[in-house]
Amino acid sequence: MLNLVIFGPPGAGKGTQSDKLIAKYQLCHLSTGDMFRLHIKNDTALGLKVKQILADGMLVPDSITIEMLEEEVQKNPEAKGYIFDGFPRTVPQAEALDAFLAGKGQKIDLVLQLDVDQEAIEKRIAKRQEESGRPDDSADKLLKRIDEYFSKTIHVLPYYEGQGKVTKVNGIGEIETIFTNICAAIDAV
Ligand code: ADP
């Protein structure tokens, strides 16, 4: 069992690197952003509830997010491990995840921190918006997401540093180089 958290600001490359990790380590990829977008696309009750929150670049309340994430883990019991992408984004989410995994006799093994400066993030997301058209990639909504990251999400790092689980990887450079460095961190666990 290998449970990873992939951590970093919006546009750090969490999704890109997660796709490569799934292929190599056969892990189950759990992206809360993707889950919310699917709910919105399918017009579910949850989707209707969170649509405006995502469009505004704000964080969805912890209770909703935690419940959705735990359900998704339960749906994939045979997984060799999980990549948590975009979750936890607050300390209460991190605490809830620890308690939930402990109840299953599991734990987080590694937190990969993708280190990217704000200038690079803004450039990447401007490019992504041209391609994907994600409404929350617009300049003002991106600033809100970056603000949410530095005011709330960043506190998740000291939480895991206290557990000695964080490895920092430079998120700037070639995708393959970053991936090689991530794999080295995983293989060192
Ligand atoms: P990015 O990492 O590019 O900001 P995500 O796809 O991870 O994008 O998340 C998109 C949006 O989904 C967030 O801005 C937020 O509104 C919501 N979201 C995703 N994960 C969480 C979470 N763990 N807690 C609260 N809101 C979340």
Image: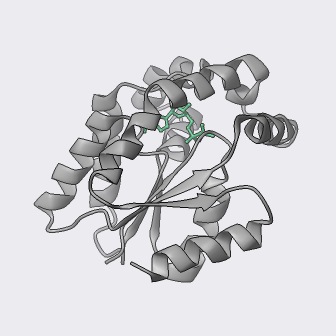
Residue at x-position 68% and y-position 56%: 171
Asked which quadrant contains residue 27, the reply is bottom left
Look at the image and tell me whether residue 73 can be seen: yes
Examine the rendered structure and indicate whether residue 122 appears above or below residue 96: above
Residue at x-position 36% and y-position 78%: 80
Looking at the rendered image, the quarter that the C terminus falls into is bottom left
Residue 121: image location, x then y, percent: 74, 39
Residue 125: image location, x then y, percent: 77, 38
Looking at the rendered image, the quarter that the N terminus falls into is bottom left
Residue 72: image location, x then y, percent: 35, 53
* Left or right, residue 101 beside residue 141: left
Look at the image and tell me whether residue 88 can be seen: no
Examine the rendered structure and indicate whether residue 94 appears above or below residue 55: below
Examine the rendered structure and indicate whether residue 75 appears above or below residue 96: below
Residue at x-position 15% and y-position 64%: 104
43 or 105, which lies in front?
Answer: 105
Residue at x-position 57% and y-position 22%: 147
Residue 11: image location, x then y, percent: 68, 43
Examine the rendered structure and indicate whether residue 31 appears above or below residue 106: above
